[in-house]
Image (cartoon, coloured by chain):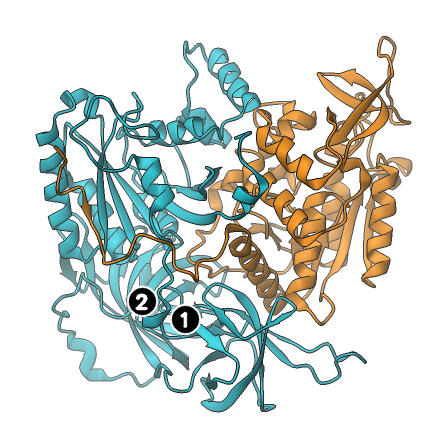
Amino acid sequence: MTTTVATVKGGEDGTDSPYALSHLDALESEAVHIFREVAGEFERPVILFSGGKDSIVMLHLALKAFAPAAIPFTLLHVDTGHNFPEVIEYRDRTVEKHNLRLHVASVQDYIDRGALKERPDGTHNPLQTVPLTEKIQSERFDAVFGGGRRDEEKARAKERVFSLRDEFSQWDPRRQRPELWNLYNGRHAPGEHVRVFPLSNWTELDVWQYIAREGIELPDIYFAHERDVFARNGMWLTAGEWGGPKDGETVEKRLIRYRTVGDMSCTGAVDSDAVTLEQVITEIAASRLTERGATRADDKMSEAAMEDRKREGYF
Amino acid sequence: MSTITTEELSATTLLRFATAGSVDDGKSTLVGRLLHDSKSVLTDQLEAVEHASRNRGQDAPDLALLTDGLRAEREQGITIDVAYRYFATPRRRFILADTPGHVQYTRNMVTGASTAELTVILVDARNGVVEQTRRHAAIAALLRVPHVVLAVNKMDLVDYQEPVFAAIAEEFTAYALELGVPEITAIPISALAGDNVVDPSANMDWYGGPTFLEHLETVPVTHDLSHCHARLPVQYVIRPQSAEHPDYRGYAGQIAAGSFRVGESVTVLPSGRKSKISGIDLLGEPVDIAWTTQSVTLLLEDDIDISRGDLIVPAKDAPATTQDIEATVCHVADAALTVGHRVLLKHGTRTVKAIVKDIPSRLTLDDLSLHPHPGQLVANDIGRVKIRTAEPLPVDSYADSRRTGSFILIDPSDGTTLTAGMVGESFAAPEPVKDEADDDGWDF
């Protein structure tokens, strides 16, 4: 026996309209809308560009949003000094290809002049916040695009698309503006700025599918290659001048690839033989680990590591 | 997940839905089960939850820790704000606006529902339709969410009896239809035991409908263009001024409703100037037709003055412009909204000065009665508002267009988002409250 009150239909035929967008088209259109809102409402926007896949997708979307004109934004890279050479090479080539202007905020500069101290663990990732926020202040950037996605981490799931930061770049999760419809509110006082996340609603898989669909070039380290690595905290790290391997850690040659790109000291590689986009997508779809869980040591420092860093001004 | 091919992944559509939660109705369990059973909770996330639960001395993993992402939320065991979650099945991708169920429910639910195509309203099968259920239904109706799911939860605690479900479904359906909710699907579930959430329940063979997830996967994502007025709020004017494109002048924006075709006659509001579409660029590629939620660039035959904030509409279907807006609003800020309040109003891509001329009524969500002339609206209040704008705006009725019929009010002093507005009549004002102050007119 079936119950009769279960469904009251509104006269639809039960199928998606031919005008429904595919999920990638819907995400793309939403991100482009966000870029154009910022271009229309802010004076000095900047895109955080690390040469990682999320910022590469952001740049690609920005280029499409303003085509055939140039994008009305500059780029900013917070250089930890522990970069993968392939990524820096990609960064510089991309900047030149699109005739963009790149600002660099350098962690090493801060360390060299004594404004920041090296950490005992050698990682520079948590040190990025000060150079980033000071650069935002000195250049008077009023909108800062970040490639952060809400699926990355549970504190990020609470992040707004337009996220107001005070004059110290701090995030206060309890005082966020509700975001209604697609009416983003970018009002801010002098000295404050807005972090803008056009990829908020994208997942790691969406990013990879979009890269495949659009034929976007990536740095080689995203694909399987042989590399000298050593194990630390359950991750494969690349040996380098930043302080690894230490005593008792042995270097071995493995077939690996990176799921994220960041500071070499805390970004781990995963074992992989995926050399094409199709293989990478298949691998991620089957993975039982999140992107950050697999590869980021800095998120494991405490239960609220991401929230705490975001409060301080991290992106 | 490993069996999904790349092609299948690309062919999917996106469904945005919201949950309407009240305390103890099992919403966290339902969300947790959806994420878990759709394999969206990965090993390291589960390990983190198990680790944190053990540290607190709990025996079993507390799945609420999966969703409560902030320090204060974990410390106090409450959910502070809307969070957005993502999961996918081979048939569809989902964005879930997970709205908390504590006292600040109204603004949070309004926020979540504003972008949702479907709202889930949970009830406890033991309690049936309660005040909170009626509030949720009223908000879903106000926000005109196209699909509503009534999830009758905890069926395991009523021995999976059909009459219990049927009575609740019937009562709710009658109530929600009266409010104007266009489509209601009632599903008997047990989020805890997993009945009818992802897999069909062996305990309720009397139920012939889809499981909860199956319904989410198959509910049509509708863009019924034939009944829509085409609208393009101009976001940005693209002028390359390059050697390659010396004369290119394109009006970029996301189509808010309907569709546009090359060759169509259009009017630009508020100026009223007319032209014809000479080309449409879809992110760099020329197309003949473009439709709602696509971000496009329109090229016009005539070189007329158009800038950010203007609205391009078909010449045969232009809305009237007005400086006097009547709307149903939900006040979302902590400070009150009062008569005489000077605000900014953002509608589409245009932000104008405005003044709150009158607050004719406040809606009591419990029984949907109208409280006349409340004097002010405080956080989470829903009420009718009359607003005078400094410039004429081409507004649609929210009933016709969720995008061009909505607006937000902003505090000009500190930028706070004050109020969410929906233009025109709402179900909540079947007989408009007589406004005695109306005789004064609208002159400044």
State the mark number for residue B366. none
Secondary structure type for disc 2: loop
Spot occupied by residue A25 in the image (x, y as percentages of width and height): 54, 56
Q: Amino acid at mark 1?
A: Gly
Q: Please give left or right for residue A271 compared with residue B129 in the image.
A: right
Q: Which chain is cyan?
A: B
C-alpha separation, residue under disc 2 versus residue under disc 1: 14 Å
Spot occupied by residue A179 in the image (x, y as percentages of width and height): 45, 53
State the mark number for residue B398. 2
The residue depicted at 9 percent of the width and 37 percent of the height is B167
Q: Which residue is mark 1?
A: B258
Secondary structure type for disc 1: loop
* Residue B73 showing in the rendered view: no
Whichever of callouts 2 and 1 sits on the residue coming sooner in the sequence is: 1
Spot occupied by residue B369 in the image (x, y as percentages of width and height): 12, 56
Q: Is residue A58 above or below residue B442?
A: above
Q: Please give left or right for residue A95 compared with residue B116 in the image.
A: right
Q: Amino acid at mark 2?
A: Tyr
Q: Is residue A291 above or below residue A95?
A: above
